[in-house]
Amino acid sequence: MTIEISNESGMAIDETVLLRLAEHDLAELHVSSEADLAILLVDEGAMEALHVQWMDEPGPTDVLSFPMDELRPGTEDLPTPPGLLGDIVLCPQVAEAQAKAATPPQSTLDELVMLTTHGLLHLLGFDHAEPEDEREMFGLQRQLISSFQAAERRRSRA
């Protein structure tokens, strides 16, 4: 599996956490170990340009997903075939503002963990336009983040 992370945001972000998260989420979703994923962290100006270009909405957003091969989650018996998952674009500055405004406030990295998982689910065909789809996507998102956090706690004790 190739996971490429590029930080062009100007903010110091622990990219190794995002790498472990992506590896964890992809394994949990039974995505082929030969699938490719790119995660790009950009500043507010770059994110705003992408947001206008692709969503026709003004201002920067927190995360955008650009699926490539329209891969879907697999199963233990039938993993997702190899291919290009696509790109997740994150804006740490927007994530930082959202993290501070959250109740209770959380770290920017915690917000980026949530946004990366959210973006990855979009790459795999999940959406939240309809209430039923939203329940499914956000439930899976919570489950993935919870299991990642548990794995990180075990890792820190080792």
Image (cartoon, helix red, strand yellow):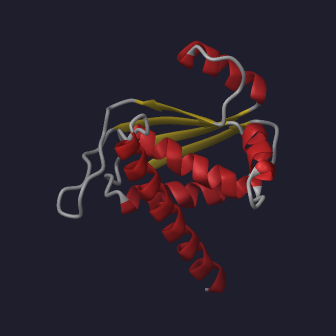
Q: In front here: 35 or 54? A: 54
User: The C terminus appears in which quarter of the rendering?
Assistant: bottom right
Residue that protrudes farthest toward the bottom in the picture: 158
Which sits in the foreground, 27 or 133? 133
Residue 123 location in percent, x, y?
A: 42, 38
Q: Residue 67: x, y in percent?
A: 41, 31
Check the image and report above or below for 84 versus 150: above
Residue 104 at x, y = what percent?
75, 61
Residue at left offset 54%, top offset 17%: 54
Quadrant hosting residue 110: bottom right
Is residue 98 positioned above or below 76 on the image?
Answer: above
Of 19 and 43, nearer the camera is 43
Q: Is residue 59 above or below residue 19?
A: above
Q: Is residue 49 left or right of residue 134?
A: right
Query: Quarter of the image holding residue 46?
Result: top right
Question: Farthest front residue?
Answer: 131
Write the residue at 47% across / 52% down. Answer: 138
Q: Residue at x 50, y 60 (%)?
A: 142
Residue 86 visible in rendering? yes
Q: Determine the residue positioned at 38% across, 41% down.
A: 126
Across and down, in percent, residue 71 comes to: 30, 39
Residue 132 is left or right of residue 108, and the answer is left
Residue 1 appears in view: no
Q: In the rendered image, which quarter is residue 64 located in? A: top right
